[in-house]
Amino acid sequence: MENIIDYIRSELFKASDEAYLKFQGSLIPGDSSSQMLGVRTPFLRSFAKILLKRPDAGTFLSSLPHTYFEENQLHAFMISEMKDYRECIEALEAFLPYVDNWATCDQMTPRLFKKNRPDLTKQIDRWIASERVFTKRFGVKTAMAEFLDDDFDPIFLEKIANIKDDDYYVVMVCAWYFATALAKQYPVTIKYLEDKKLTPEVHKKTIQKACESFRITEAQKAYLKTLK
């Protein structure tokens, strides 16, 4: 069997698209075009599932840091498809320190999180307490994805309101979280804006995002504008 690293790079280079590379490069600051190949996400998602079936998948997952953006994307999608929760958490702990952009962070969505709520709560606490920007962002994004619907837990509103970090990517994910919480859990969430519990920047961006949302009523939007 061909070395998995060589195999992956060969397939990525074959799937690269120069026009898409230019478009993609404009969306993801921090990654130079020399580190990106311009491979579309649907291909990467499908390829990740194929790679997970290989006996040497662990060789790729342990070969950190990766060279190309698309290798990081593959890594994120492979983690998202893992079937064993403990293996998934261990893989995340190894990979999160190397995540350096919003796309890799936000597109990493492990399916089995929904079946492991008690421990996941502890993991989110650790992630949002991290000094690393994208580890913290991943923690907030996970709380938003997993604990705003049937398993709504208002404790995360308090925890995320207490994040004091002026990094752009942290501010934006916190605002995204609270705007989504307004759409899904309005009566509890609105109090955080009424009582000015968020940092000024998160408060401002939350209102902006909520007012742009189709899930917020016109009456709610009008009231939110009075809280600016």
Image (cartoon, helix red, strand yellow):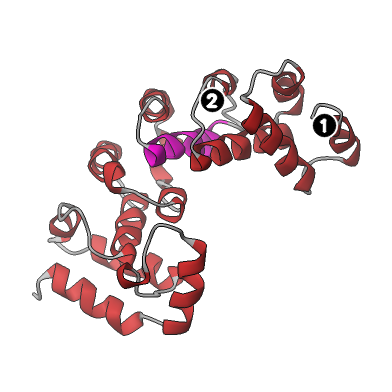
Taking 120 as reference, is 154 left or right?
right
Q: Residue drawn at (40%, 46%), measured in percent from left and top?
A: 110
Image disc number at residue 113: none
Q: Residue at x 22, y 79 (%)?
A: 10
Q: Is residue 94 above or below residue 50?
A: above
- Neighbours of disc 2 within 10 Å: few (<14), some (14-19), many (20+): many
Residue 185 higher or lower than 103, as above or below: above
Q: x%, y% of residue 87?
A: 23, 41
Give the mark, 1 or 2, whose residue is nearer the N terminus: 2
Seen in the image, is 184 located left or right of residue 111?
right
Q: Which residues are magenta?
A: 133-147
Asked where in the image residue 77 lies, by quadrant, the reply is: bottom left
How far is disc 1 from disc 2 in space, using C-alphas?
Answer: 19 Å
Q: Which residue is mark 1?
A: 224
Q: Amino acid at mark 2?
A: Ile
Judged from the image, the secondary structure of the residue bearing numbered disc 2 is helix
Label 1's element?
A: helix
Tag 2 residue: 160
Number of marks present in the image shown: 2
Is 190 or 207 nearer to us in this picture? 207
Specify the quadrant of the image occupied by residue 71: bottom left
Q: Nearer the viewer, residue 177 or 56?
A: 177
The amino acid type of the residue labelled 1 equals: Leu
The picture places residue 46, in percent across and down from the top left corner, at 38, 69
Q: Is residue 136 magenta?
A: yes
Res. 145 in view: yes
What's the residue at 39%, 74% (across, down)? Answer: 39
Rendered location of residue 78, percent (x, y) = 31, 56
- Residue 91, percent across and down? 24, 44
Q: Main secondary structure of the magenta part?
A: helix
